[in-house]
Image (cartoon, grey):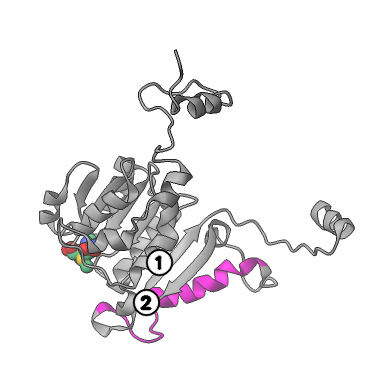
Amino acid sequence: MKPSPASIPLRAKSRNLLFSPCVCCPATETNPLSPAAERENPLTLWSEFLNNKQRTIHKWKHYFPAYEAHFSRFVNRPILFLEIGCGRGGSLQMWKRYFGPYARIVGIDINPESKTFEEDQIEVRIGSQSDLPFLQTVLDEFGTPAIVLDDGSHRMHDIVETFRFLYPRTAADGVYLVEDLHTAYWDEFGGGLRREGTFIELCKSLIDELNADLSRDALPATEFTCSTLSMHFYDSMVALERGRHPPSKDIRISGRASLLKGLLK
Ligand SMILES: C[S@@+](CC[C@H](N)C(=O)[O-])C[C@H]1O[C@@H](n2cnc3c(N)ncnc32)[C@H](O)[C@@H]1O
C-alpha cells in the first residue's frame, strides 16, 4: 500500500524510540506535550483571562506577565497546582484551562461555599491556610504541589505561617508565589512599612539566606539556601523558584587551557 504523506515522518521518527508508539495516542506533530505545539499556540494566560466566560476571576492586570514567567514551564505537565483562596471560583477554572488536561487544581478556602466550585480536574478543601494540621491533610491527600499560589486572607500572620509550612513541602523544582502583598504595608492586615513580622520583611531576610554561602560565615547556609534558586519581587507579588542550590563556584574563562583548568579544578 502506498503510504500516506502523514505516516512517513511518523515512521521515520519511531526508529529512535525505546518503546513502540502508543496506539491509543500516537505521537504526532499536534501532541500537546511537544514544544513545537507550545510555540505555535498563540493563547496566553492574559488572553485566557480576558476571554473568560466562566466564573468570576479577581486578579490585578500586572500579575499576568509574572504568572507567565514562572508558570509557563508547567503547561501540559501532570502537576498539582495549589491555590489558597478560591474567591468566586473563576481562577481555579482559569488555571485548569491554562495548565491543560493533566493538571490537578486544588483550591483551599475557609468559605464552605467554595466546595461548589469543584468540577473535573478541580477539587476544593475547606479550612484555614494557617491551620497546619489541615494543610497536612491536603498534602496527604493530594501529594506535593508543583506550584503554591497564596491568594487567601492576605493577613501577614497567615501568609507567614503558610509559607513556613508549605515552602519546604513544595516540589524541589517548584514555584511558591504570594500575591496582593500591598497588604504587607496595610495596618489592618498586620502590615506596615518595615514592620516586623510582615511577609515582605521575612523575604528581606531570606535574601541574606539565599546568599549565605558567600557571606564569609556571617550566616550559616539553611534549608532555604540549599533549596532556593531565586527570589523575584514584583509590585504586590513575590515569587520564589525552588531548585537545588549547591555552594556557588566561579569559573574564569579566557581560552581553551584556562577553560579546562577552571572546569577540572
Ligand atoms: C481574593 S479572594 C481569592 C480570589 C481568587 N483566587 C481569584 O483570583 O479570583 C480571597 C479568598 O480567600 C479566602 N480566605 C480568607 N481567609 C482565608 C484563610 N484564612 N484561609 C483560607 N482561605 C481564606 C476568602 O474566603 C476568599 O475566598
Sequence order check: which comes first, mark 2 or mark 1?
A: 1
Horizontal side of residue 196 vs 107, given as left or right: right
Name the main secondary structure of what is drawn in magenta.
Answer: helix
Q: Quadrant of residue 70?
A: bottom left
In front of the other: 217 or 100: 100
The answer to whether residue 152 is seen in the rendering is: yes
For the residue marked with disc 2, what is the amino acid? Thr
Span of residues in magenta: 189-213
Which mark is drawn over residue 198?
2
Q: Residue furthest top?
A: 1
Q: Quadrant of residue 235?
A: bottom left
Q: Quadrant of the C terminus?
A: bottom right
For the residue marked with disc 1, what is the amino acid? Ala
Horizontal side of residue 55 vs 132, given as left or right: left
User: Helix, strand or loop at disc 1?
Assistant: helix
Q: Is mark 2 within 8 Å of ligand 1?
A: no
